Amino acid sequence: MNAGVLAFGDSITNGGGELQWGVALQSWALWVARGLGLPYTGYAADGARVTDVAGAQVPAFLARTALPDARYDVGCLYAGVNDVRSGEWDAGGFEAAYGDVADVLAARCDRLLLVTIPLDLGRPRAGARVVEANAAIERVARACGALVLDLRDFGARNLVMTDHVHPTAFGQVAIAERALDVLAADGMTVRVRPSTLITPGERTRRHALQGDWTYVYRALKERARDAADRARRAVRGA
């Protein structure tokens, strides 16, 4: 019997955060495991780049697992968001490290699910780097026979936080639903839809207005922070 779902990645896969209308913010990969009725093992960490996944998460898994010879039903890898948003983007290095992690997962998992990065990522947008990273992810997927969860078009106000990076609680569920569609198309049995497991609290007009104002306030803070960062970089470059 296989050991379920194994996941590597950054804060998006690690999950955790504030409630959204009473729904807890849980990892999309955990929701996938629940949807498949399988155990979940996660090594994702906040702020991780793909080199952190390869150099810290994979070794941690190899050193700590109590089931060194186990096979997993699904391996999940969602990494690259922090890479494309950093000032040290290296497309070739990213692809090499990403491929190393994918190889580890492919050797231990019946199915490997790799995730592309939303094009509307961050403020200011990461832009062309996302396109380069997604092309690398797809090349790795073809090389190791992985499935691809395409999130290029992912993003909506109730699904992504004001930083345009992190999914909300509903966003995590939406990613899991897409992932389960990919896995179901490849022959896996989905035992329950995550969207049926959440029970959002009552959304009154007053609550809706509070949510609207909170979103606007946080969005303005993000824009002000971005403007300040750009001004500081301009001063340093002058």
Image: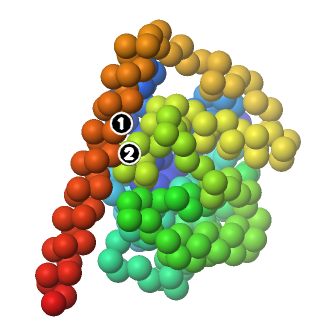
Q: Nearer the viewer, residue 204 or 33?
A: 204
Label 2 with label 1: CB-CB less than 8 Å: yes
Question: In the visual, does 82 lie left or right of 224?
Answer: right
Question: In the visual, does 167 lie left or right of 76?
Answer: left
Quarter of the image with the C terminus is bottom left
What x and y, as percent, mark residue 86? Answer: 35, 72
Q: At 69% from the left edge and 75% from the top edge, which residue is drawn?
A: 139
Quarter of the rendering containing residue 195: top right
Pointer 1 residue: 215
Quarter of the image with the N terminus is top right
Quarter of the rendering containing residue 143: bottom right
**In the drawing, what numbered circle is on residue 51?**
none
- Coloured how? rainbow
Q: Nearer the viewer, residue 94 or 42?
A: 94
Identify the secondary structure beneath mark 1.
Answer: helix
Pointer 2 residue: 162
Hey, what amino acid is under mark 1? Answer: Tyr
- Pick whichever of labels 2 and 1 is earlier in the sequence: 2
What x and y, as percent, mark residue 91? Answer: 50, 82
Identify the secondary structure beneath mark 2.
Answer: loop
What x and y, as percent, mark residue 231? Answer: 19, 73
Q: Nearer the viewer, residue 234 or 167?
A: 234
Is residue 127 in sight in this rendering? yes
The crowding category of the residue bearing disc 1, from other C-alpha atoms within 10 Å (few below 14, some 14 to 19, many at least 20), is some
